[in-house]
Image (tube, rainbow, N blue to C red):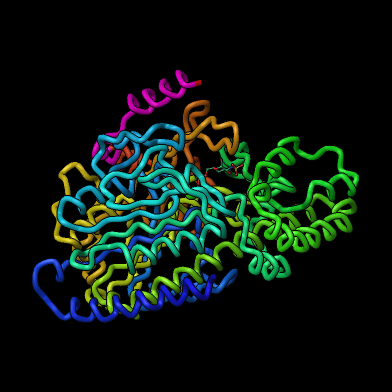
Amino acid sequence: MYTKNLLILLGFSALIISSSACRNTGKAGDQDRPNILFIMSDDHAYQAISAYSDKLISTPNIDRIAGEGILFTNACVTNSICAPSRATILTGKHTHINGKIDNSMPFDTNQVTFPQLFSQAGYETAMFGKLHFGNNPKGVDDFMILPGQGSYINPRFITPEGDTTITGYVTDIITDLALNWLEEKRNPEKPFLMMYLHKAPHRAWWPNPEKFEEFSAKTFPEPATLFDDYKNRGTAAREAVMGIRTLLLSYDNKVLPGAIDEAGITNDDPRNRRYFEGSDYSRMNEEQRSIYGPILESISDDFKSRWPSMSEEEKRRWQYQRYIQDYLACISSVDDNVGRVLDYLDESGLAGNTMVVYTSDQGFYLGEHGWFDKRFVYEESFKTPLLIRWPNEITPGISNDEMVQNLDFAQTFLEAAGIEAPGDMQGKSLMPLLKGDTAGWDRDAVYYHYYEYPDGQHMVKRHYAIVTREYKLVHFYYDVDEWELYDREKDLMEMNNVYKDTAYADVVARLHKELDEMRLEYKDSPELDKKFIDIYMKEE
Ligand code: SGN
Ligand code: CA
């Protein structure tokens, strides 16, 4: 079956190679306009991309994008959570303007998204994978998206023709769909915009069986702050519920529920078994169960033999290893699949005039501060990976440390395609930076605002912030009124809130003023903060 599909794919590749070879020699009209391939994964921390750091994993394919293009080392998001990040990317506006401030708020479909503008300008457009908006994408000629968070195993897809379920592993399937569209479905006479959006490595981190087996046998280094005690920080860090020890033993760490009983544990989180029973595990067919089974048994045996005699510290270490093993295993599949797509672009002759972007909807904690998840403006979740390749325009192997944001993507792609951006977009095109022209880049601070609180789950308080290269000034509000200041140059791990340190009095005064100005400039305000709280109260 697989071989047959492969042969069909190869056949089509050959056709495309010959047609695109002709197409790319021309320099007139549509053939000048670049293709855009936007690759985004879900919760992919920059710490888990070897172009940024090789401490945890090697990602040779994702790295290729930067090796043959540009690596942004200071890219960040405006609101570190899934659907708001996607809304910012699609609209080029902060979430208080586009209205999608949290995962549950509906997306206002009257908002203009950049794929609509591409479509109007004659581009062929498509979207495959995770959107997470609660409504279908606008401006795409073709799409297959996961409902909500979607599933890792045998995922269901929403398509323009109705729903369908595909047997297999989600990362491979989304890639098959994207490649199939590139090879067979798109109109080769037009430039394309493709949104290729992975579900991985989102919780609950189900790897494919081969990676699961491979990575569950590895041991990974621990971050320096795995045992952070949140001293010298505010209430928000102490009260957030995203500690490694709050990971659920079966649902997250893949210990079979029976093994928890056999280990004599009587105080397991009541959600654990329920969630596990409704998880990807329940979606497996018999054949898949028989492949995953021995790996789950081996994890469960290790758990039973060691857990009952472990100290609290050892339990945190054990749960961290299980977490990071599965997380990185999921990324390894993403990397392999990105490699398939890059190879296709090379082989088809499309690579030169295709801008390939790799990013994530936000960063993620990989045990730093003792956490998983995101949401905070603190470094690991505020920053996001950003790698861009476009051989016809970008000098290979450059790196850029300017403060760029996901807010900038829409205007960048529009400028690249020669399409005028609407005047109310709030970002800045990165085109000069892609061309190595940093002289005219005059942004020295970015704005951040997170809203999803109280969420009953991770409980990260509402906050807004101004971030400059040197400092981060944050205001936590709603049920607290607390300010934090971090010295980003002296305190890389953000362990000391120096807001009340008199040595920083001038900095605090200056940043307060700049933050006020920035809130005005981006049209955010105390009235809007209140409006969003009122909407939230009504929903409750
Ligand atoms: C789920 C996860 C959370 C996660 C949110 C948001 N819990 O609710 O841990 O923060 O998604 O993620 S789970 O028990 O359902 O796995 S986001 O990427 O969609 O914003
Ligand atoms: Ca996410």
Most foreground residue, 92 or 296? 296
Q: Residue at x 38, y 38 (%)?
A: 135
- Return the x and y of residue 281 as percentages of the image width and height: 68, 50
Question: Is 489 above or below relative to 93?
Answer: below
Question: Is 346 above or below relative to 359?
Answer: below
Q: Residue at x 61, y 55 (%)?
A: 205
- Return the x and y of residue 532 as percentages of the image width and height: 39, 26
Q: Residue at x 67, y 68 (%)?
A: 215
Residue 505: in sight, yes or no? Answer: no
Work out which residue is located at the far left of the displayed protein and give it.
28
- Return the x and y of residue 394 as percentages of the image width and height: 26, 74
Q: Which residues are magenta?
A: 517-539
Q: Residue at x 53, y 45 (%)?
A: 497
Query: Residue 400 lies in magenta, yes or no?
Result: no
- Return the x and y of residue 24 as percentages of the image width and height: 19, 77
Q: Quadrant of the N terminus?
A: bottom right
Work out which residue is located at the far top of the displayed protein and give it.
538
Tell me how many marks there are.
0
Quadrant of residue 186 within the rendered picture: bottom left
Query: Residue 525 lies in magenta, yes or no?
Result: yes
Most foreground residue, 508 or 66? 66
